[in-house]
Image: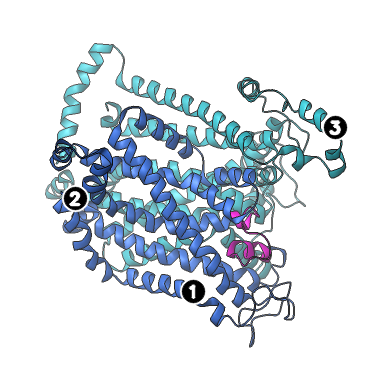
Chain colours: A blue, B cyan
Amino acid sequence: MKRDPLARKGLLGRLPEAWRQPLAVVGGVVALAWLVVALAAPLRAPHDPLAQELPRLAPPGPGHWFGTDQLGRDILSRVLYGARVSIPLTLLLVVLSVLIGGLLGACAGYFGRWADETIMRVADLVFAFPTVILAMVVAAALGASLVNAVLAVLVVAWPAYARVTRGLVLGVREREFVLSGRLLGFSAWRSLRVDVLPNVTGPVLVLATLDIGTALLLLSGLSFLGLGAKPPSPEWGAMVAGGVEVFDSWWVATFPGLAILTVVLAFNFLGDTLRDALDPRTARAIKERAL
Amino acid sequence: MSAMTSAKESADAAPRVRSRRGVHPLARFLFRRILTAVLLAWGITLVTFVLTNLVPGDPVTANLGQRALGDPAIVAQWRAEHGLDKPLWEQYVLHLRGVVQGDFGVSQQSHRPVAEDLAQFVPATLELAGAAIAVSLVLGVAFGVVAALRRDRLPDHVLRVLSLIGISVPTFWLALVAFYVFFYRLQITPGSGRVDPAIGEAPAVTGLQTVDALIAGRWDVFVSAVGHLITPALVLALYTIGLLTRFTRSAVLEVLGQDYVRAARAKGLPGRVILFRYVLRSALVPVITVAGLAFGSLLSGTVLVEAIFAWPGIGQYAYKSATTLDLPAVMGVGLVVGVVYLVINLIVDVLYGVIDPRVRLQ
């Protein structure tokens, strides 16, 4: 209703520029390809990812293009099926941290006072720990499972969104269109949803896109440590861990690692371009030519 | 423009602050920062304690065998031995009192004081993470400056892709690949551990193998220690190199647009002088802050790298104690890593205040 016209134009008006960047195109195509793989894995995978029917530790070749692991499972099929494990969980993870962190940050910024103090001090505490250490402690305490690993990453991931959202909300809270909404009798919830939210989405979306990569790295790292996916599951981090025991057979660890790398890289390409397009500071810096 | 006016305002405000309180603003700044850090350190003890106690995992089942678990007397005795039969707040007070006195409890796995374990493992990790942050700062800043100065030209594009790859590679996988390629295949780097076992370690003084070797005057140990350090440190540093390249680039670009840089160029100063005296000095302030935060990711990364290179540091210790639910050890690791991270960021904050006078007055 009373959206900030500048912010709306800023987000949507600059998006087409972002799509013309080669990095964003590459990132978008690769990310899309992995989504298709995740959907189509049961149709296209040459073997059952759990069946132990092939020769053990066979090098890549016809019939099993990525080779087989120490239990005679086809690595190509496992990598393809791995997309169904890692990608949906990572996306869910980021959506949940955006919702939780965004809501808490918005409350902190909008209501101020004790809500601000409580929420931001808790966020500071989480920031006081290096992420993997904290996630590891949480995951170990909850017990090794993929769902618990997601919860553990969630614990360390939400504060970043709380901080960013709080800062943005603080910036618009006293603006005229928000105040006039309040004077018209909007409830706090309606004011946040209608007047504040549209001014916050752009930067939070950029952060979320960049965070998909970080979340996947953290999640597969926990699985690598044995604190995530359980053994037969074709999770990429756990597959790399399996390759450590037989690192003579390089293909066992190499391909799942490459899968993680390409997914993370694709989303980082996308996020980096989006940030450049939406960040007024880089936009301004680009205009000025110096040295 | 806004930066200039705020600088002017703070310059006006400075003498007033000083005369009113009679304390140097930098001292007040320091005091406030140290107070915050102490509060956060207390918060860390609370978080590690609550996390390791309120979660469903039961240390009794993780540490006692099946037969012992069936005997209530043994279970009760084990709980009493580790103080687990007392109410939670009392456990916390005991824990806090111990921590202040440097007593972190006894590890349930190694049956040694956790403080002893930590003293043994922390220096190895600090050496690894220190080497990695040094490499990252040098390379990251250099790459970032080059990218900013050649903006939108080939070096900038290449460095952008490379730095994005740097922050996208899974550390644990890279460690494995590096180990396989450079040690196993090409045999140009030494294998796992901190020094060649045939040479032996230098007598421990600082716990940092390279420094100890120099103190003992053992050149051969030093060379071996550096050789063992290079690959894990580079693997660990790749992420922070990428991060610092990106941040240095945008910080330098930001400064390049400032009026005083334009003025310096108008005066006809040579580009080298402008770069080092005008641009880098103020661009490095945010970069140092990011480097402080990046140190946390390095400490985290050691958990993933140390396992592959058999580096006897806190990362391996953390992993072992987390998977066995060794609560005192987990709390000790969380506490030490959290405090190291706090101290690093305190130093960064102070540096920030020393370099940029505007910060002290906020």
The amino acid beneath tag 3 is Ile
The amino acid beneath tag 2 is Gly
Q: Position of residue A125 (x, y in %)?
A: 47, 35
- Tell me what residue is drawn at x 68 percent, y 36 percent: B327
The amino acid beneath tag 1 is Leu
Q: Which residue is mark 1?
A: A39
Q: Secondary structure at mark 1?
A: helix
Give whichever of A139, B360 is nearer the camera.
A139
Determine the image quadrant of residue B187.
bottom right
Q: Which residue is mark 2?
A: B257
Q: Is residue B108 left or right of residue B118?
A: right
Tell me which segment is drawn in magenta.
A222-243
Work out which quarter of the rendered image holds the N terminus of chain B and state it: top left
Q: Chain of mark 1?
A: A
Q: Is residue B43 left or right of residue A14?
A: right
Q: Nearer the viewer, mark 1 or mark 2?
A: 1
Q: Which residue is mark 3?
A: B74
Q: Tell me the distance, in whole angstroms, between the alpha carbons under discs 3 and 2.
A: 71 Å
Residue A226 painted magenta: yes
Dot label at residue B358: none
Mark 1 Cα within 10 Å, few/some/many (few <14, many 20+)?
some
- Tell me what residue is drawn at x 58 percent, y 80 percent: A45
Q: Tell me the distance, in whole angstroms, between the alpha carbons under discs 1 and 2.
A: 47 Å
Mark 3 Cα within 10 Å, few/some/many (few <14, many 20+)?
some
Are tags 3 and 2 found on a single chain?
Answer: yes
Q: Is residue A214 left or right of residue A140?
A: left
- Sequence-earlier tag: 3 or 2: 3
Q: Chain of mark 2?
A: B
Give whichever of B280, B317 is nearer the camera.
B317
Q: Position of residue A1 (x, y in %)?
A: 16, 51
